[in-house]
Image (tube, helix red, strand yellow):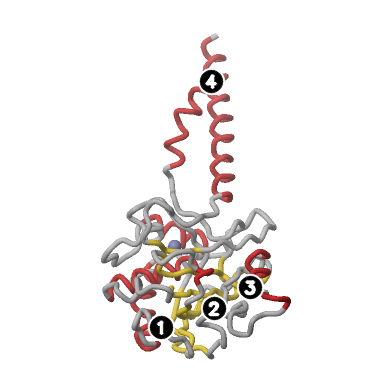
Amino acid sequence: MKYLLLLLPFISSVHAYTLNNNFGASFKSSSVKVFVDAGTVCPVNQITVNDLESLIDPAIDDFWNTVPTASLRLESGGFSQSISNINEGRLCSPTDEECISEADTAGGLDPMKGIIPPTKEITIACNNNNLNFGGSNVLAVTIPNKFSGKKIVGAMILINESSATFGNLSKQDKIGVIAHEIGHALGLGHTEDTAALMFYRTVNQRKHLGQDDIDGISYLYPISGDAFGLSDGLLGSCGTISTDKKNPPGNSPFFFTMITLGFYVLLFEVLRLLKSSKARSAT
Ligand SMILES: [Zn+2]
């Protein structure tokens, strides 16, 4: 038991990445397009749809398309068909009943503020519904909002229009935020590794992925075969990026807690066997 406790910190530091869904959901296809909603407006952040679209190529080519150990290949899809409530709608995971019932006002969906319909692949838009963000320090929020079994079909990235925080960033930092949000759309949660793009807090002038991001995306999009899932649960969680260091947005680390526990049990068993074989050879 003494050995086991000594090993705990060592094993816990193997990786820090988490998954955005408790069963390790990823897109079925390794080829995923990223769009900007053609009808979105971002007057508070003072960016145009063309500005937004120009962030996609660097966000994918300088970050997620640079991983030789992952099968994932992202591509800009340009502009997608406009969604009518994109600028005010509530972004709900299909399994988040509380979010869905809150958006269902007075017994019927408000046509302007109801639930944003599920999308295909990844779509970026601006949105001023405070309920989506929970604070002006949150730059953007991302939720996979359509699943097929354990696979992601579509995800939505919303830029927070309730403050100008995103618009005030440099172009490089805007690219970093979009790349971070694409990471959530692809299925990654937050990490506590400060060198990673998926660290929950913005880090100025980030220009490439960290090793932890590379490990996470290679796990979700392996070169051959699909990533595996251990549970049938489908609790899509909300991926956000914040400027608030004290209150990191939530993660879903359950999956890796179980994997780590598995390691401990295995190690304990090996140590026990070693000990008993030593005891035998001493006699
Ligand atoms: Zn985030």
Judged from the image, the secondary structure of the residue bearing numbered disc 2 is strand
Q: Which mark is residue 103?
A: 3
Q: CA distance from mark 2 to mark 4?
A: 53 Å
Q: Are marks 3 and 4 in contact (CB under 8 Å)?
A: no
- The crowd level at tag 2 (other Cα within 10 Å; few <14, some 14-19, many 20+) is many
Farthest top residue?
A: 283
Q: Which residue is mark 2?
A: 121
Q: Are marks 3 and 1 in contact (CB under 8 Å)?
A: no
Please tell me which residue lies in front, 144 or 225: 144
Q: Which residue is mark 1?
A: 42
Name which of mark 1 and mark 2 comes first in the sequence: 1
Q: For the residue marked with disc 2, what is the amino acid?
A: Glu
Judged from the image, the secondary structure of the residue bearing numbered disc 3 is helix
Q: Which of the two discs, 3 and 4, sits closer to the camera?
A: 3
Q: For the residue marked with disc 4, what is the amino acid?
A: Lys
Q: Which mark is residue 275?
A: 4
Name which of mark 1 and mark 4 comes first in the sequence: 1
Tell me where residue 243 appears, x and y as whole percent. Answer: 36, 61
Farthest right residue?
A: 107
Q: CA distance from mark 3 to mark 1?
A: 22 Å
